[in-house]
Every structure is written in structure tokens, then in C-alpha cells.
């Protein structure tokens, strides 16, 4: 008797739908009709509350160095490799972000500072939940903001089995909801293989012997399940080696980025990919130009730079959006670390991004300018940045209910993306509608 647990374990296949039967099983993965390509959003969650003040350093604010005597990154200086990398005379990158500096200077990477959630919680769990749901302070929200983006793209529902994919063991909160999404720990595991690890193909026997069990497990969609696996195997995304000299960092994060590029280039209709990288909670020995944070940023920057290099001429279809639940305290603590704070910094990387600039009003680091006398104050609500990417990149309406209880105003968007006469998303949607007539 095949149990549900055994089916998922032996196939390595995570199918998630919180509505009725998974819609993607009705139509297996297909390339977009007419050669149109959907825009792709790659969302990366830095779990643990990344220290925005030591990622994009406000070296032009005189209070910064005074408040961080041991972990502060000094202002830029010619020939020094332990100082911030100047961006505009006021802000600088942490030196570990050097792989991203050429992308910033080419105008493909933008930063938004003093951004975050208006909710003042310092709980990792609550803040991550609020950000992924898109409803700060509200725990009862049923779906995630990325799932709502998929729901709004109703004309594209039949286009691909792989519109929303998390390169993770479980589906993140941001992708949970009625629109179908996949949690795929590894593209190599998205298959039916011998449990003994011999690599022999079990699909023909599995299909005939366990059809009824799979039918019961998936509510009558067993055959289309096998079809979806077959189509992914036919596309062979993992056979695509990194291009243009891209070298990904070793580890889970680098693997997820490499497989994201493979999915994009396989033309399986990917629209939203979700990745995560942990290890940002540095209460002790955070370090300055060297240390724990520097190590995290090195892997982060090398991974993003490799993805961007690997994508080549697909960059115009892609926006990478980074996020973290909140920032860190402005003043370093007694353990040469930082505690849970408020506002932080986020990145937008894309072929159409108006980069080479740090967006957001700087609130200042003087005591009277801090949030609750200790944290970087918030001047940009994260929902305005997320909505700008959803509207100006994914092509959704700014009037769509992306963030319940929050009235979107395009004039509040940070400005990292230009309004377009017809975005790649709109061209893709037009092609889909024509094919369904």
C-alpha cells in the first residue's frame, strides 16, 4: 500500500495547492505560445534580519562611525580593501559586495534603504510571516503575496505547470494560496527513481502498479502527474551548464540560484521563483569588513553575480528582489554584534531596473531621528517596492488586491522600474489569450 508520505519521499515531488485539485496537473508544463516569454520575478528572502547599515553603508552620516566603533565599515579610501565601496559619495557597499559593484555601475542594480515593515515586531517568526503574507500585523491572512500575484495572472493559468516554484523543501508562506505552486528541493529529485539509489527508471512500473494509489492520493489526476514529470525530464533543465563564465558559490544557495537559471532558460513558463538564504542574525561578533556578516555577504554577492552573468540575454525578462524581515539596531551591542531592529535595505536587480542609485529618503542616525531611540527609521513601506515590481514588471494592475487593507498608490512606488507602454508581461498575456481563442 503506497502511503502519501512514501509517494512524496520516493518521487522527490512536492505538489502544493491549497484550493481544489492542482490546476497545473490539468495542463502539463508548456513553453509560452508564439515564442512569447513571461517576465520572471526571483524573490530572495534573507532570513534572520540582515544588517542593512553594514550592507549599504551610510558613511556620509557622521553618526554611523560613532555608533559602531568596532563593527563599522570605514569610509572609502583609494587602495584600501577593508573599506566601503563608494556608490554616490554618501553610501557605500560592504567590501564583500564587490562582485555586485559593476552591476550597480551599469545601472542594473538598485538599492532601497530605510525600507521595511511598519509593524514594530522584533519577532523573526511574526515579521517573516507578515512580510510573506503582505499584511503587517495581521496573522490571519490566508494566502501569500506571491500567490496573489499568480492569482491575478488568471489569463496565464493554463500556460505552465511551473509558474510558481520555490527551490526549497517546503512551500514558503509567500507562495501559499489558491494558485498552484511547487516546492522543489532539487530539480534532480523531481522524478520517479529507484529508492535503492540505483538510478533505474521506475516510471513504467510505478505507473501500472500504483495507478490506483496515485489516483487516490491526487484526486484523479495521476496520469497528468506522470505527464508533468515527463515534460520536465524532456526539457532537461539540469543538463544546461552555467554560461558566460558564471561560477556559482558552493552550497545550497548557489545550487538554488543555478537551478533557477536552468528553469528560466528551459522555457517552462516560470514566472515566480522563491529562494532563501539564512544566517543573518548576528547578535555576537558580527564583524566589520571581515567576520560573520562579511562571509554571508560574500556568498550572497557571488551568487547574485553568477546568476546575472549566467542569464545573458535573458536579463531583460528578469527582476531579482531581495528582502529581509527587519534590520538591526543602529548602535552595536556589548558583544560586538547587533540586536533586532526596524528598517533595513533591499535590492532590485534587473535588465529594466533603473539602477546605479540608492532609493528611499534617508531618515538620519541622530538619536532624535531613530525609531524608538535605537533603530533606523522607516521611510519606505516594503509593500510599495513589492507592488512596484508586481505592477511594472509582472504587469499586474496597481488596483489589484495584492496587499489586503493597503491602498496602493503608484506615486508612492520607490521608482526602481519605469512605467512601460507594454511590458513583457503584457505581451506574454496577449499571446496566451490569442492561443486560447
Image (tube, rainbow, N blue to C red):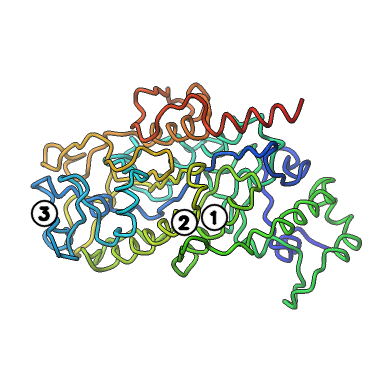
Name the residue beneath numbered marker 1. 261
Residues under labels 3 and 1: Cα distance? 39 Å
Name the residue beneath numbered marker 3. 65
Q: Residues within 10 Å of mark 3 (few under 14, many from 20)?
A: some
> Which structural element holds mark 1?
helix
Q: Residues within 10 Å of mark 2 (few under 14, many from 20)?
A: many
> Which structural element holds mark 3?
helix
**Image disc number at residue 307:** 2
On screen, residue 309 above or below 89? below
Residue at (29%, 43%) from the top-left corner? 356
Seen as rendered, the residue at the extreme right is: 208
Residues under labels 3 and 2: Cα distance? 33 Å
Q: Mark 1 near mark 2, Cβ–Cβ under 8 Å?
A: yes
**68 relative position to 416: left or right:** left
Name the image quarter holding the C terminus.
Answer: top right
N-terminal of the two: label 3 or label 1? 3
Q: Mark 3 near mark 1, Cβ–Cβ under 8 Å?
A: no
Q: Position of residue 176 (x, y in %)?
A: 58, 43
**385 relative position to 141: left or right:** left
Amino acid at each position: 500500500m503506497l502511503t502519501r508520505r512514501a509517494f512524496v519521499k520516493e518521487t522527490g515531488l512536492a505538489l502544493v495547492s491549497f484550493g481544489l485539485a492542482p490546476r497545473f496537473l490539468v495542463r502539463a508544463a508548456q513553453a509560452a505560445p508564439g515564442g512569447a516569454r513571461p517576465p520572471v520575478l526571483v524573490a530572495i528572502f534573507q532570513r534572520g534580519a540582515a544588517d542593512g547599515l553594514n550592507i549599504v553603508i551610510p558613511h556620509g552620516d557622521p553618526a554611523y562611525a560613532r555608533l559602531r566603533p568596532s563593527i563599522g565599515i570605514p569610509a572609502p579610501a583609494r587602495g584600501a580593501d577593508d573599506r566601503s565601496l563608494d556608490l554616490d559619495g554618501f553610501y557605500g557597499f560592504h567590501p564583500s559586495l564587490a562582485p555586485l559593484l559593476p552591476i550597480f555601475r551599469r545601472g542594473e542594480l538598485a538599492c532601497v534603504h530605510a525600507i521595511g515593515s511598519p509593524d514594530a515586531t522584533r519577532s523573526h517568526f511574526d515579521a517573516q510571516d507578515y512580510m510573506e503574507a503582505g499584511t503587517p500585523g495581521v496573522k490571519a491572512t490566508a494566502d501569500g503575496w506571491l500567490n496573489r500575484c499568480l492569482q491575478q495572472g488568471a489569463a496565464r493559468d493554463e500556460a505552465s505547470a511551473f509558474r510558481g516554484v520555490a527551490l526549497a523543501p517546503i512551500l514558503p508562506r509567500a507562495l501559499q494560496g489558491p494558485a498552484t505552486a511547487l516546492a522543489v528541493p532539487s530539480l534532480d529529485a523531481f522524478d520517479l527513481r529507484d529508492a535503492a539509489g540505483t538510478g533505474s527508471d521506475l516510471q513504467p512500473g510505478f505507473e501500472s502498479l500504483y495507478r490506483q494509489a496515485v489516483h487516490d492520493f491526487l484526486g484523479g489526476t495521476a496520469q497528468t502527474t506522470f505527464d508533468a514529470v515527463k515534460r520536465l525530464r524532456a526539457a532537461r533543465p539540469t543538463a544546461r551548464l552555467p554560461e558566460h563564465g558564471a561560477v556559482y558559490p558552493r552550497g545550497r544557495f548557489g545550487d538554488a540560484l543555478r537551478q533557477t537559471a536552468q528553469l528560466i532558460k528551459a522555457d517552462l513558463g516560470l514566472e515566480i521563483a522563491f529562494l532563501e538564504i539564512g544566517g543573518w542574525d548576528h547578535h555576537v561578533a558580527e564583524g566589520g569588513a571581515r567576520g560573520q556578516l562579511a562571509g554571508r555577504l560574500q556568498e550572497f554577492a557571488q551568487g547574485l553575480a553568477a546568476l546575472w552573468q549566467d542569464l545573458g540575454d535573458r536579463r531583460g525578462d528578469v527582476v531579482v528582489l531581495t528582502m529581509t524581515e527587519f534590520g538591526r539596531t543602529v548602535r552595536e551591542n556589548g558583544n560586538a554584534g547587533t540586536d533586532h531592529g526596524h528598517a533595513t535595505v533591499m535590492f532590485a536587480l534587473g535588465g529594466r531596473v533603473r539602477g546605479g542609485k540608492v532609493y528611499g529618503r534617508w531618515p538620519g542616525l541622530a538619536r532624535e531621528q531613530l525609531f524608538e531611540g535605537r533603530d533606523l527609521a522607516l521611510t519606505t513601506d516594503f509593500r510599495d517596492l513589492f507592488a512596484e515590481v508586481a505592477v511594472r514588471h509582472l504587469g499586474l494592475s496597481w488596483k489589484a488586491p495584492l496587499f489586503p487593507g493597503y491602498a496602493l498608490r503608484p506615486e508612492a512606488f520607490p521608482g526602481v522600474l519605469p512605467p512601460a507602454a507594454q511590458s513583457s508581461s503584457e505581451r506574454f498575456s496577449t499571446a496566451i489569450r490569442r492561443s486560447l481563442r
